[in-house]
Amino acid sequence: MPLIENDDKNLVEKKISGEKVFDGILLHVRKDEVELPNGHKSVREWIDHPGASSVIPLLPDNQIILVKQFRYPVGQVTLEVPAGKLDAEGEDPLVCAERELSEETGYTAGKIWKLTTIATTVGFSNEFIHLYAATDLIPGKQHPDDDEFINTVKIPLTAAMQLVESGKIIDAKSIISILLLAKQIY
């Protein structure tokens, strides 16, 4: 389905001008003046993000490998699928997923496939995360980035689904990955 269909053209906002408010290492904050469909003007503040990939590793016994790490913005340790940002403009999301699987878990995948792509926060960011699943895993040595401190956890997929339902897994990409993988398996 196209993003904008003919009957949706009355919803489209047009950029009049834009400025960079902040350029960080990961995030770039923008402020644009737009013309609304009714001709009025408004301001849109948004975050420009390079995008990311994640991968849910599935073992032969239907256990998955998740990572635990402290997430500063929410002030807690979270349980997530391995993931990371696209490192270069135009980087293949599959290459990113394979890299993050290796870095964060030590595993490489014999088979990897795409589950879906999600837009994380459409109200203020252009971040898309490409979600993958992986099987036929070959163990190796974990090698996270210097600023990443990660513990890996093996957990039955059914138990992960219960953690999603109970609100103990709160990360959106992980919730979606777990539910989509479970739908494919069960």
Image (cartoon, rainbow, N blue to C red):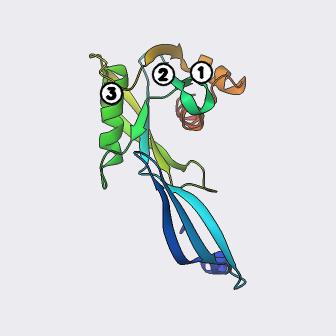
Name the residue at the front extreme. Answer: 21
Name the element at disc 2. Answer: strand
Q: Earlier in the sequence, mark 3 or mark 2?
A: 2
Q: How many marks?
A: 3
Q: Is residue 37 above or below residue 184?
A: below
Which residue occupies 65% across, 21% down? Answer: 163
Q: Name the front one of labels 2 and 1.
A: 2
Q: Earlier in the sequence, mark 1 or mark 3?
A: 3
Quarter of the figure with residue 57: top left
Residue 145 numbered mark, or none: 3
Q: Nearer the viewer, residue 55 or 31?
A: 31
Residue 66 numbered mark, or none: 2
Which residue occupies 44% across, 15% down? Answer: 151
Quarter of the image with the N terminus is bottom right
Is any part of residue 34 visible from this angle?
yes
Q: Name the front one of labels 1 and 3.
A: 3
Kind of residue sitting beneath label 3 = Asp
Could you say where residue 6 lies in the image, as x and y percent from the top left?
Answer: 61, 80
